[in-house]
Image (cartoon, rainbow, N blue to C red):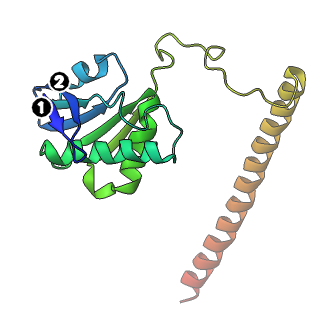
Amino acid sequence: MLLLLGDGTQVPVAELPGDGPWTFVVLQPEDRGVARALTRFGRVVAPDLRGRPGWGEPPGAPGFLELVDDLDQVRTRAGLGRPLLVGLGELAQVALRAAADQPWAWRALVLLSPATDPATATLDELDLPALPVGDQEFATGGVIALAAVIVGTFLAAMVGGKAGEHYHRKVDRAGFAD
């Protein structure tokens, strides 16, 4: 279907009927695999915001804010009430901004990144920032920190046990004095 926005442009919107009680608005750049998977839980509405002013602009840019406004217009003009908002990839920023600006308009927010497949990803593929220490230093430091935690826990348990024993002996003495 095509939705007519306030500025007179039309936005294509894919609507997938679902089996459950929920309504989802899915912002997904290309493949609609997530949208199809969500139909098990309810109706899915997936507006195609590509080509709209602001597409590809950084968050906070005037055009980016127009995408957030377009999303709200899709929600209200399609009569969706308070749907669950799902943002994927670069459109997750739009979903996040929309939910932050209008928390009353969305039942929940889900942000996903299809950059890696979590089922097959390894830590090397995730491109996480490196720790500022070498492997040997990290191993030695980790062992020292672990030992300090274990010793600290042991000492705290001993002090707590002694304090509890002292308290209960005091209570017992008071009970026998009566």
Q: Residue at x 43, y 33 (%)?
A: 55
Could you say which quadrant of the image residue 71 lies in?
A: top left
* Element on which disc 1 rests: loop
Residue type at mark 2? Arg
> Which class describes the residues within 10 Å of circle 2: few (<14), some (14-19), or many (20+)?
some
Question: Residue visible at 37% across and 23% down?
Answer: 29
Q: Residue at x 37, y 41 (%)?
A: 67
Residue under label 2 = 40
Q: What's the residue type where badge 1 is placed?
A: Gly
Can residue 80 be seen here? The reply is: no
Q: CA distance from mark 2 to mark 1?
A: 6 Å
Q: Position of residue 133 (x, y in %)?
A: 87, 29
The residue furthest front is: 8
Q: Which mark is residue 20?
A: 1
Q: Residues within 10 Å of mark 1 (few under 14, many from 20)?
A: few
| Front residue (pair 24, 20) | 24
User: x, y (%) of residue 175?
Assistant: 54, 82
Q: Position of residue 119 (x, y in %)?
A: 46, 13
Tell me if 58 is positioned left or right of 43 in this view: right
Res 146 visible: yes
Disc number for residue 43: none
Image height of 13 relative to 79, above or below:
above
